[in-house]
Amino acid sequence: MAFGGVQLPRTLLCVNIDHVAALREAGGGNEPDLLEVAAVCKDRGCNGISTHLREDRRHVQERDVFAIKGRIIAKFYLEIGLSDEMIEIAKKVRPDRITIVPEKREETTAEGGLDLGKHISKIRDTVELFRNEDIPVSLFLEPDMETVDICKECGADYIEINTASYCNAAQITEVEGEIDRIYRAADHAVKLGLKVNAGRGLNYRNVVPLLHARELLEVNIGHSIISRSVFVGLAKAVDEMLEVLD
């Protein structure tokens, strides 16, 4: 990907497969098979697979995360809320990266970023715990400077910028403002030595304007790819997203 005459590295793709688990749970059986879905994503060239294990187990189950980690030779990222139960499970699973996200029972997916100021002591202790286990930690946060600063204070390795506000923006000025926020936050994070990912609500179209953000390493996309796979199949849907990222 060239920008201003400079060749930029391709932003990597992580596929979140929570919506596949939701489909399986709605049917009450074992299909679709999450391991098969994860294997297809890995074989098509995705950098990683991610799932969110919720306290209420509404879609992804404990058996899923242990099975994916044990049988799929790909990077596996686990999203968890800030509870002692989830932290203990994550220690046993030993994913390639933990992403700490806010968790509200009434939400379909995590809509807002972490309130780092409110939970800073717990987050700092959790980051240190996983660092001692040699498991990198990412914090899911809103794209603003102060929040990025707190993330650095907590000792995290990565940030995942919440792109929901950008994806939900309707007016062009609002869209441009959200893009600017994301770019500024990413730039600030890189200057602080943090690695930058992004996700929530991204699709084949709206991801494009974000790809020139400074050192955006990876995008975490699930719903859009799974929805597209209904029409073209999963392998093709993943291929099409990888082409966009190229």
Image (spheres, helix red, strand yellow):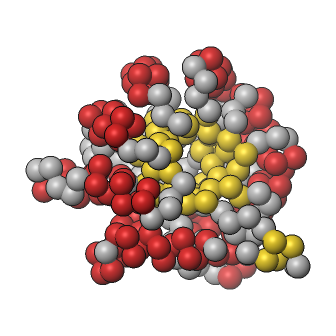
Q: Is 112 drawn above or below residue 97 in the view shown?
A: below
Q: Position of residue 102 (x, y in %)?
A: 51, 40
- Find residue 124 and report its image quarter: top right
- Residue shown at the point (37%, 70%) measured from the top left: 235
Q: Position of residue 58 (x, y in %)?
A: 27, 44
- Find residue 170 and report its image quarter: bottom right
- Residue shown at the point (65%, 35%) measured from the top left: 116
On-image quarter of the C terminus: bottom right
Q: Is 135 drawn above or below residue 139 in the view shown?
A: above
Q: Is 219 drawn above or below residue 84 in the view shown?
A: below
24 with respect to 104 (left or right): left
Q: Position of residue 145 (x, y in %)?
A: 80, 48
220 with respect to 217 (left or right): left
Residue 215 visible in rendering: yes
- Find residue 11 and report its image quarter: bottom right
77 with respect to 56 (left or right): right
- Residue shown at the point (36%, 53%) measured from the top left: 38
Q: How many marks?
A: 0
Residue 126 visible in rendering: no
- Residue shown at the point (79%, 77%) measured from the top left: 2
Nearest the eye: 93 or 181 = 93
Q: Position of residue 179 (x, y in %)?
A: 72, 69
On-image quarter of the N terminus: bottom right
